[in-house]
Amino acid sequence: MSPPAVTEPSHVVLNEVVRRYEGPPAIHALGSIDLVLRRGEFFSVVGPSGCGKSTLLDVLCGLVRPTSGSVQFEGRELRGEVPDGIGVVFQEDSSMPWLSVRQNVAFGLRTSELSQKEITERVDHAVSFMGLAQFSGHYPAQLSGGMRQRVCIARTLVLRPRLILLDEPFGALDQQTRLLMGDELLRLWRETGATVMLITHALDEAAMLSDRVGVMSARPGRFIDMVETGWPRDRDSRIVSDATFGTVTARLWSSLRAESLKTMGRAA
Amino acid sequence: MLLEICCRTGIIDPLTIIPPSEMIVSMVDHIGSGEFNESIVNTFSTILLAFVLAIGCGTLAGALVHRSSRLRDVADPLLASYYSVPTFIFYPLLVALLGLGKAPLVVLGVLSAAPAVMISTLSGLDGVSPALMKIARVHRLSPARTLWWIVLPAALPRLFTGFKLALSYALIGVIAGEFILSGSGLGYAISFAYQSFDNRAMYGLMLFVLLVAVIANGILYVWEERLARRRSSG
């Protein structure tokens, strides 16, 4: 098996990031977190429910300011605004029911200064890349949950983001669809060369897709383990049959088990 | 048909209700004669004004209350009990304040219709998915673009319910105001016919008002259906 191609310089740097929410009740949601995302890597985050995974994503893309610490994207510090170059796909269906598939995808470029020709080309490419060409005139209500999530990914894709953040995008999908969507995601990651960070609660999904998986503690979320999977860049869902896949998943679970029990109020 | 038969056979006294066919003939006669043209214009322009103002005031008030949790705490119980207040009791006060013209009727129509718009605005804004609001921030949309591109389209189905109710309430408020206390308009004409025992004119005009209300609501219904069709599967 060839070594992973994730030796590029840092793309995102989180330095002693802490996020607290004022009460009542006051909540210490996250941190302190130190994390470096390497350019072009596929990084996943797993952790027990309520550990602050989504808060981490919100902080990382600039939607939420850290209470202390700093977040740098491509060398620039984020100051409460999502910078150009970051695309986000949320867990909830965020397709717009009043727009067709094509209009949904093009929504990402409404404020861009691109020419109409380039907008059309980008939308055409994103729509066909996500396998939605036949459905471009359909409305989200006419699509399955998986297809609606593809629409949301395509809407992010037209922006050509250099960092793609995904917050449990396949959470509501069945297992087969999740595996296939995982393959789509890997293909997208390979072809765009973007850095990807995936938040997921599914250990097998994290193990299958990632170059590196960060395991978070129960709230306040901190990284308690970093697992390098060592997968080749050219991979797909068939990696689950690799002999070391079980080893990776087992390590993730052994790191996570005690934390998950804590959230259930039980000792390890 | 049953009503027609009952009226024609004398089961129902024609002094109480005239046959529907005669109502239609009376409506065509009275409206066609042109004698009510001024009343028609007066009444429907008042309703339209009250409807438009109710949409403006109700939407604005709903949006303001939605932004403030303190205002929301105050407004929620008031809105919940609002329609138990007979707004017509304020008509003498409105006449004293605004005089005997169109103004008190418009205010009465707005008082009847605006809370329905406000309630539907609150419900519509509450229903906008937080994920869509995050999308607005991810795309760095200005507040105006967020409102125009995301909030309004997302809230539109519930807003539309409020618009339909507002039309009905504005119509009821204005016609009832004219009926009870005004000296002009279709409501007054119906009231005058009733007090003069002119059943034919009264039913003809009532049918006309009903017909216009049904057509106006039908137009809104068709428009709403067209919007809803996109958002539903199938």
Image (cartoon, coloured by chain):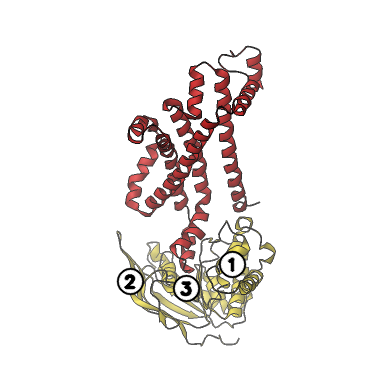
Chain colours: A yellow, B red
Q: How many other residues sit within 10 Å of disc 1, few (<14), some (14-19) or many (≥20)?
A: many
Q: Is residue A169 visible?
A: yes
Q: For the point 47% across and 50% down, which residue is it?
A: B124
Identify which residue, B181 or B111, lies in the foreground: B181
Quarter of the N terminus of chain B within the rendering: top right
- Where residue A106 is drawn, which disc sits there? 1
Residue at the spot of label 2: A67
Residue A95 sits in quarter: bottom right
Residues marked 1 and 3 touching at CB (< 8 Å)? no
Tally the numbered discs. Answer: 3
Distance from the alpha carbon under mark 3 to that under mark 2:
21 Å
- Chain-order first, disc 3 or disc 2: 3
Q: Is residue A192 left or right of residue B58?
A: right
The percent position of residue B211, horizontal first and vertical second, equals 59, 32
Residue at the spot of label 3: A45
- Where residue A217 is drawn, which disc sits there? none
- Chain-order first, disc 1 or disc 2: 2
Q: Amino acid at mark 2?
A: Thr
Q: Amino acid at mark 1?
A: Ala
